[in-house]
Image: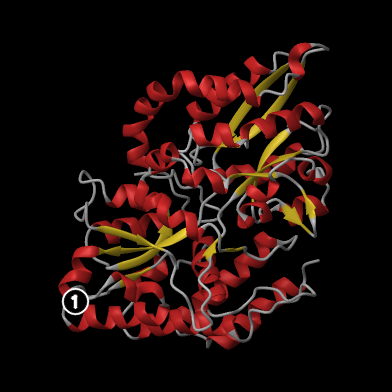
Amino acid sequence: MAAARRDGMAMRPDHNHNLTMSRRGFLTAAMGVGAGAALAACGSGSGGSGAKVTIRALHQQQAGYSASDIQGMTAAFMKANPNIKVENTLVAYDALHDKIVAAAPAGTYDVVLMDCIWPAEFAKKHIVADISAKVKGLSGLDGIFPGAIETAQYQGKYYGMPWLLDTKYLFYNTEMLQKAGIKPDQLATWDGVKAAAQTLKAKNIVQYPITGSWQQAEAVICDYAALVGAFGGRFLDDAGKPAFTSGGGVQALQFMVDLVKSGLANPAARTSVEDDVVKTFSQGNAAMALNWTFMYGLANDPKQSKIAGKVGMAHTPAGPGGKAPGVNGASALAITSGSQHQDAAWEYVKYLTSKAVQDKFATSSLPIWKASYDDPAVQKAGTPAVVAVAKTQLQDMILRPQVANYNSASQQLQVSIQKALLGQETPQAALAEAANAFTASS
């Protein structure tokens, strides 16, 4: 089973994990010579003279890129920049945030992986440096997906460069839909998804057509975020105040509650995170579900799935207003404020986020660069069916609220959503309760 965070917070699914395993060797062999030349071109040449410096980078284990991927990228960077030595540390996601915060006073790390929900906190606490001038100085910045570039921004400033890019998609069981006479096009809207679920249930094709990762955890915020966007809501208004307590925010939660009440969504969704969704879907116990990219590979793996070859993947459905964003699950590489080697750190960040490097490792994680998706090599590495959907979905993503106290505020929102899903409070009342946590942020 590919790695998926238990709480879903900024989960970095191992994109198309199983296919990754089968294709990595091929890609390495096929691209070896050409990629070497391309990567050399990415080198800054900064290692040609001057004193040698050592920078330390903190990465995440089981992210889109494997440890060996990161090792390979880093080795190529050091070869092109002989005066910069990079020492990498990889930790589990659960430890990443606290390790970054704890190490900040000592300036232990020069480069850190920053989840898209942390820029506000890290910027406020001066943990990461404002690198707006460096980022804006890059050519071709408009060639990056807008949602990806937002990952590293806070209040108009850049605190990193996007690196890992992912979002949730709608997965469906093609065989179940065919038996029910439902065309995949019907799933383009949430109304269509609901109608499809009603048909599937009425025809006894599956008891609970929909499942989700709606446990009281960050995972439910990710699913809720996509629905908030689809129903035309926002987490915060222009003044930074809670806006999910009315309009689309309430409608989104009401939609989730109604799915559970009507038996269209599995009650077990309330105790499920993304791994559980994979299991339920792969066992043929659900027809539709939102999940990260990694589910495509796992659900199509006959060794662990009963529905291999029967997995469809689509853009997230649109809501009443026609919007259909996917939740932003990206991460950025940031340079710490305490780094004594910020120029060298920037060279490393530039290298890892460059199109050439990201294209080479597209099997593990799809690039942040829009043009990559038209590259046949990237399409093959990332799986054509996945890349085709990603190309449109990654254009349209919604960020979770950018507040400095995100972790505590999110926890309160998780509690409130759970109360509504359990029928203990109305969606309106539950969300109003959660708003206090966001009001307390600055």
Query: Residue at the spot x=32%, y=68% of the render?
Result: 288
Residue 385 rendering spot, x and y as whole percentages:
35, 52
| Relative horizontal placement of residue 100, taking residue 247 as reference (left or right) | right
Q: Which residue occupies 61% across, 20% down?
A: 40
- Left/right placement of residue 96 relative to residue 190 reads right
Q: Is residue 243 above or below residue 125?
A: below
Protein image colouring: secondary structure
Q: Is residue 129 left or right of residue 181?
A: right
How many callouts does the rendering have? 1
Asked whether residue 266 appears in the rendered view, the answer is: no
Residue 259 appears in which quarter of the rendering?
bottom left
Which image quadrant for residue 111?
A: top right
In the depicted view, which residue is nearer to us: 31 or 275? 31
Q: Residue 125, how many percent across, how many down?
A: 82, 50
**Residue drawn at point x = 45 percent, y = 20 percent:** 32
Above or below, comparing residue 82 to residue 390 in the picture: above
Quadrant occupied by the C terminus: bottom right
| The one of 135 and 410 positioned closer to us in this rendering | 135
On the image, the x and y values in percent for residue 314 come to 38, 63
Residue located beneath label 1 in the image: 181
Q: Amino acid at mark 1?
A: Gly
- Asked whether, in this view, residue 406 is left or right of residue 197, the answer is right
Residue found 62% across the figure and 52% down from its top: 148
Q: Is residue 24 visible?
A: yes
State the SS at label 1.
Answer: loop
Q: Residues within 10 Å of mark 1 (few under 14, many from 20)?
A: few
Q: Pick the quarter of the image with the N terminus.
A: top left
Q: Residue 212: where, in percent of width, then height?
A: 39, 67
